[in-house]
Image (tube, rainbow, N blue to C red):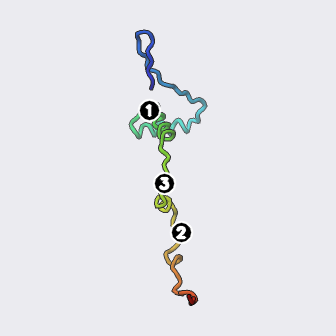
């Protein structure tokens, strides 16, 4: 929000956004989400935009990437062979 002084009055100016031609399904879901969160539809719209556009897009750690991977088989699939390999003379 920005404030500017005009003459003797201070005017608060905040951008407005009008979204036209929305599918009725989107509007219905927005209303339901707003009601579930105890907000007006307009406040919910602002919150969605803030969450998406102002989110910090930090890097995830290697551990976080691994934790997001789906299960990939059984532990036995990854078991090592008891074979020690060939003997090498050093």
Tags 1 and 3 touching, CB below 8 Å: no
Badge number at residue 33: none
Q: Closer to the observer: label 1 or label 3?
A: 3
Specify the farthest residue to the top.
Answer: 7
Q: Nearer the viewer, residue 38 or 65?
A: 65
Other-residue count near label 1 (Cα within 10 Å), few / some / many at <14 / 14–19 / ≥20: few
> Horizontal and vertical percent for residue 67?
47, 61
State the residue position of label 3.
Answer: 60
Q: Nearer the viewer, residue 11 or 5?
A: 5
Q: Closer to the observer: label 3 or label 2?
A: 3
Point 40% across, 39% down: residue: 37
Point 50% across, 52% down: residue: 59
Residue 1 vertical position relative to residue 71 in the rendered view, above or below: above
Real-space CA distance between mark 3 and mark 2, rounded to the nearest whole angstrom: 21 Å
Badge number at residue 72: 2
Specify the farthest residue to the left.
Answer: 38
Residue 52 vertical position relative to residue 19 in the rendered view, above or below: below
Q: Earlier in the sequence, mark 1 or mark 3?
A: 1
State the residue position of label 1.
Answer: 43
Other-residue count near label 3 (Cα within 10 Å), few / some / many at <14 / 14–19 / ≥20: few
Tags 1 and 2 touching, CB below 8 Å: no
In terms of secondary structure, where does tag 1 sit? helix
* Left or right of 43 on screen, residue 81: right
Q: Earlier in the sequence, mark 1 or mark 2?
A: 1
Tags 3 and 2 touching, CB below 8 Å: no
> Horizontal and vertical percent for residue 35?
42, 37
Q: How many marks?
A: 3
> Horizontal and vertical percent for residue 24?
56, 35
Q: Nearer the viewer, residue 76 or 45?
A: 76
């Amino acid at each position: 929000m920005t404030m500017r002084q005009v003459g003797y009055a201070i005017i608060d100016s905040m951008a407005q956004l009008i979204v036209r031609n929305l599918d009725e399904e989107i509007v219905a879901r927005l209303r339901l989400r707003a009601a579930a969160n105890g907000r007006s539809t307009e406040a919910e719209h602002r919150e969605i935009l803030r969450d998406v556009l102002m989110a910090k897009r930090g890097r995830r750690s290697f551990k976080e990437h691994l934790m997001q991977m789906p299960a990939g088989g059984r532990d036995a699939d990854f078991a090592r062979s008891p074979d020690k390999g060939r003997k090498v003379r050093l």
